[in-house]
Amino acid sequence: MSSKPAIKVENLHRRFGDILAVNGVSFEVGTGEVVGFIGENGAGKTTTMRILASLDYPSAGSAYVMGENVVNFPARVRSCLGWMPDSYGAYDNMTVVEYLDFFGRAIGFKTKERLQRIEEVMDFTDLTPLAERLINKLSKGMGQRLCLGRALIHDPDVLILDEPAAGLDPKARVELKHLIRLLADDGKTILISSHILSELGEMCDSLLFINQGRIVHHGDAESLKRQSGETAIYTVEIAADTDAQQLNDWVAMAPMVKILDMRKSGARIEIERDEEEIIAGILRRMVTEGLPIVEFRREERNLEDAFIDMLGNADAPKNMPSGGSN
Ligand code: ATP
């Protein structure tokens, strides 16, 4: 991380009545970093992001964007920050270009500068051919690109994007990802929230996991897998005609193995250790004791599994899809 963080959050709290939406959150995002903000519904992502965007006040703690305190200097924060909310409200009777022009005027650009920025933003988000289209005639993906364009109109150094990929089809998601990558290459600092763990893993320099208002992990995807203990899952497929009772008896007596599932096509057994010698020993025993192995597989653990393991089964998120949709 560079010496001066672009985003800094210190012991942030936000209470809504009885609900402690943000409970002692602290983190830093270095200049030019892309950080994924991940958590289940209601974890506290939007609340944290809204405070950073100077749209809400913390109950306690502080937050800074480019060194400016968001509570004391909201205008300075807004001048260097682009905010993309998870929904951008109803502007049905405006065209794309009118919408961008409206926000360009709100920012106070002079005519020449405003027209130039609108052109640049429409070009970047590939909206130029849609300039005269009414907003309510845009697809979800086009709408998200427009929303991103609005956040970029004043060329901010820092971008806070709240669930920008939510509800997008795979093609629109790839397009959005590409735009975010270009912005990152341009040196923007980006905090981006999502439920789509696997996608953010590819796109972000680090991942910030929030659960029930608390940060539970901040690091890259690999460090999350390491923290959860195992990096891979080892499974053994047993032939379909194996006697189920014999298999159950064998597994009951063998340490460090468990049956994952029994199907018509055969049974799947997991070896619950990630050490070569132990795995080799178990496989040897299986062969010498007559279990008909048809396949042995090593699968990289995915991020969702690692995250759920890390939280522990008791409070693991129940709605964390394995990618692809929100
Ligand atoms: P989602 O993915 O569903 O948007 P999130 O991680 O962004 O979830 P938040 O929107 O920050 O979560 O909500 C955190 C908690 O605070 C939730 O329990 C939510 O119901 C509550 N909350 C958020 N805003 C308010 C509000 N204005 N008034 C009361 N409760 C609120």
Image (cartoon, grey):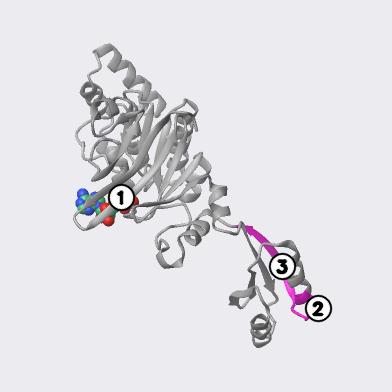
Under circle 1, the secondary element is: strand
Q: Residues within 10 Å of mark 3 (few under 14, many from 20)?
A: few
For image coordinates 36% across by 27% down, the residue present is: 129
Instruction: State left or right for residue 267 relative to residue 54.
Output: right
Instruction: Evaluate whether residue 7 shows in this view.
Output: yes
**Which residue position is annotated with label 2?**
288
> Of helix, strand and loop, which one carries label 3?
strand
Q: Is residue 247 above or below residue 133?
A: below
Q: Magenta includes 114?
A: no
Task: Identify residue type, mark 3.
Answer: Glu
Q: Residue at x 46, y 26 (%)?
A: 187
Q: Nearer the viewer, residue 18 or 111?
A: 18
Highlighted magenta segment, given as a residue range: 285-300
Distance in Å between CA atoms under marks 1 and 2: 56 Å
* Percent position of residue 113, x then y: 30, 14
- Badge 3 vs badge 1, beta-carbon distance below 8 Å: no
- What amino acid does circle 1 point to? Val
Ligand 1 within 8 angstroms of badge 3 C-beta: no
- Residue under pointer 1: 22
**Mark drawn on residue 295:** 3
